[in-house]
Image (cartoon, rainbow, N blue to C red):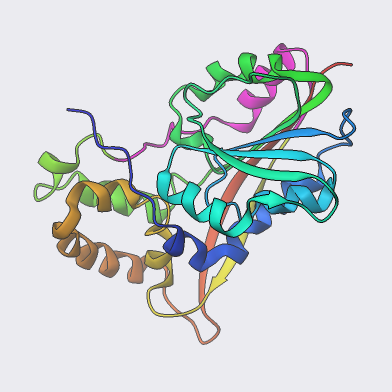
Amino acid sequence: MPAAAPTWDPGQYLRHAGHRARPFADLLARVPELPGDPPRIADLGCGPGNVTVLLADRWPTARITGYDNSPEMLDSARTEHEGATLGGGRLDFRHGDARTWTPAEPYDLIISNATLQWVPEHTDRFPDWIGGLAPGGTFAFQVPGNFDAPSHRLMRALAHSTRWKDRLAGTLRHDDAVLAPEVYLERLTALGCAADVWETTYLHLLEGEDPVLDWVKGTGLRPVLTELGDDAEEFLADYRTALRGAYPGTAHGTVFPFRRIFAVARKED
C-alpha cells in the first residue's frame, strides 16, 4: 500500500522561517526582469506563503498565485497573506499538485522553493512548465541537496531497522530524490532555455534544545510522523539520540550544514 501523503504543520515549518527563507531570497536575486506588465507569477509549492510575499516585494504590481496540495498550508497562507498587495497587485492561493499541475495561462515566472524533491521524476514536468511560460519568461527552482547528510542517513537507517521497517518501508525519500546540478543544467538547456545552475552549502547556526530534530519535524520527517501517528514518540527518542551525536551543540549553537541546488532558466523571447 502506498504511504499516506504527509500531513503538514505550518506552525512547525515556520519555527525556522528565517533560515528557510534565505535560499528563496538567493534564488530570487538571480531571476531576471520579467516580460509582462504587470507580470503573472506562479509559486509552485508555496507552503504557508511566507516567501511568496517576497515576490510582491520584487514585483509590486504582479498577479501572484501560490499553489500547494496541503490544506493546512493553504489555510495558513490565505489567512496571513491573501489579498491586494501594496503595489496594486494581487496575491492569492489555490490548490495545486506539482505532480500534475500544468499552467492554464501564460506565466512570466514559475518559481518553486524546496518542493520538487517531493515530486518523483520531476524533470518530466519541465517541458509543460516551460511551455507555459510567456516568451522571455523564467522558470526557477531550489531543492535541498543534502540527502546524504547525517540528518537524512540516520532517519533512513532507523526507518529501515527491524523495529520500524514493516511500517516505514517506502515512506522516506531516497538520495535520488534530486538530481546532480549538471543534470538539471542539461535538461533545461535541452529545452531551449538559457540556464544558470549552482549549489550552495549553508551553515545554519540553530538555537535551542535538539534544534536539528525540531527542523526536520517541519519538513523531511513529516512522512514518518504522518505514518506513525501516536506511535512516533518511540521513533523520535531514538532519532533524537542519533542526531545529538551527529550534530553536537556548542557554546554558540548547533551548526547544521545544508546543501541546496538552484536553477534559473529563461525561455527564449
Give the residue displayed 18% in from the left and 64% down from the top. Answer: 233
x, y (%) of residue 42?
67, 34
Name above or below for residue 207 compared with residue 61.
below
Give the residue displayed 77% in from the left and 28% down from the top. Answer: 138
x, y (%) of residue 151?
39, 56
The residue closer to the viewer here, 247 or 95, is 95
x, y (%) of residue 169?
19, 37
- Residue 245 located left or right of residue 207: left
Query: Can residue 32 be seen by looking at this rendering?
Result: yes
Name above or below for residue 55 compared with residue 122.
below
**Range of residues picked out in magenta:** 172-196
- Residue 214 located left or right of residue 269: left
The residue closer to the viewer here, 38 or 52, is 38
Quadrant location of the C terminus?
Answer: top right
Query: Can residue 24 be seen by looking at this rendering?
Result: no
Quadrant location of the N terminus?
Answer: top left
- Residue 113 located left or right of residue 107: left
x, y (%) of residue 46?
57, 44
- Residue reaching furthest to the bottom: 251
The residue closer to the viewer here, 10 or 169, is 10
Asked whether residue 183 is drawn in magenta, I would say: yes
Name above or below for residue 206 compared with residue 84.
below
Give the residue displayed 82% in from the left and 56% down from the top. Answer: 86
Asked whether residue 248 is drawn in magenta, I would say: no
The residue closer to the viewer here, 260 or 17, is 17
Give the residue displayed 55% in from the left and 44% down from the top. Answer: 114
